[in-house]
């Protein structure tokens, strides 16, 4: 299967600082990338969908000024959590999809964010 | 609102038995169907995908799709303790959007 690399895998930051998470598709061009958040023992929650070269589409209730998404190329999308607070602590996961109808999503390894 | 529904479980199955996981979806125009497995603290990983009505087998896993009933299932034969995980159903709908179920937690008891 295709490889999606997410970095960093784990980060601890102070309250009020910003954290950038990278998601790269290593061996294919990802027309669409998705960002999810998952709290302990809960399901994946889609935060936003990003298409290369255009603004991300955020799900209801997700603050676009707080969670900045940039999809600058067909192989890279970034999520920046700005002015992080302890309640932003979560497991953030990206996935990437190749173009086409019958194509599956490939997931990055996830980033465990802890805001102290 | 387009939905994908799964029983949250936990579903407890004895080792060696068949585990049956079910998923229903609301968009009749849905195109393709995926089963992912997620271990605690890890990202989901793809197990199988199915596009056409009927059964698709891959090793111990069988995906079953019934578009008329808007139902997709995953069977795991000869269940092993290592199969214990949360299983996520995902459906690509008529707008090519990927809609996720909430997942079913499966526990295989030795």
Image: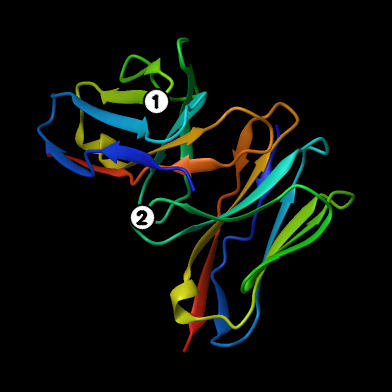
Q: Residue A41 falls in which quadrant of the image?
A: bottom left
Q: Mark 1 — on which chain does it sit?
A: A
Q: Residue at x 23, y 21 (%)?
A: A82
Instruction: Count all numbered tags in the image, as a single digit.
Output: 2
Q: Assess disc 2: are there few (<14), some (14-19) or many (≥20) residues with their C-alpha within 10 Å of its C-alpha.
A: some
User: Circle 1 — which element?
Assistant: loop
Depicted A105 relative to depicted B54: above or below: above
What kind of element bears circle 2? Answer: loop
The C terminus of chain A sits in image quarter:
top left
Q: Point out the residue furthest to the right here.
A: B68
| Left or right of B69 on screen, residue A115 | left
- The residue at 47%/27% (across/down) is A29
> Does B51 sit left or right of B39 as displayed?
right
Question: Residue A115 appears at what percent x and percent y?
Answer: 17, 37
- Residue shown at 69%/32% (left/top)? A101
Q: Is A92 or A101 nearer to us in this picture?
A: A101
Residue at point 25% right, 40% down?
A: A89
Give the residue number, with chain letter if any, for mark 1.
A75
Residue B84 location, x and y as percent? 47, 72
In this view, the residue in front, A43 or A25, is: A25
Q: Is residue B93 left or right of residue A79?
A: right
User: Are the numbered discs 1 and 2 placed on the same chain, yes or no?
Assistant: no
Cα separation between marks 1 and 2: 22 Å
- Residue A44, given in percent of the width and then of the height, sits at 47, 44
Residue B42 image label: 2
Q: Chain of mark 2?
A: B
Mark 1 vs mark 2, foreground winner is 1
Q: Position of residue B32 (x, y in %)?
A: 71, 42
**Extreme residue toward the front, this view:** A27
In which quadrant of the rendered view does residue A81 lie? top left
In the image, residue A101 sits, relative to residue B60, either above or below, namely: above
């Amino acid at each position: 299967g295709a490889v999606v690399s997410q970095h960093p895998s784990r980060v601890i930051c102070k309250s009020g600082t910003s954290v950038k998470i990278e998601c790269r598709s290593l061996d294919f061009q990802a027309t669409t990338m998705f960002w999810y958040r998952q709290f302990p023992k809960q399901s994946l929650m889609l935060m936003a969908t990003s298409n290369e070269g255009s603004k991300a589409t955020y799900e209801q209730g997700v603050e676009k000024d707080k969670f900045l998404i940039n999809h600058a190329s067909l192989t890279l999308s970034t999520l920046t959590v700005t002015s992080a607070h302890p309640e932003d602590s979560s497991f953030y996961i990206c996935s990437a999809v190749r173009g086409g109808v019958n194509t599956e999503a490939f997931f990055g390894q996830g980033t465990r964010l802890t805001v102290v | 609102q387009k939905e994908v529904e799964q029983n949250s479980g936990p579903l407890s199955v004895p080792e060696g038995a068949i585990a049956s996981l079910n998923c229903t979806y609301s968009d009749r125009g849905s195109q393709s169907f995926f089963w992912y497995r997620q271990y605690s603290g890890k990202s989901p990983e793809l197990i199988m995908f199915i596009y056409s009505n009927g059964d698709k087998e891959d090793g111990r896993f069988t995906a079953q799709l019934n578009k008329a009933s808007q139902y997709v299932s995953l069977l795991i034969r000869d269940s092993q303790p290592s199969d214990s995980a949360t299983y996520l159903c995902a459906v690509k709908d008529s707008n090519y959007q990927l809609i996720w179920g909430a997942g079913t937690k499966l526990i295989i008891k030795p």
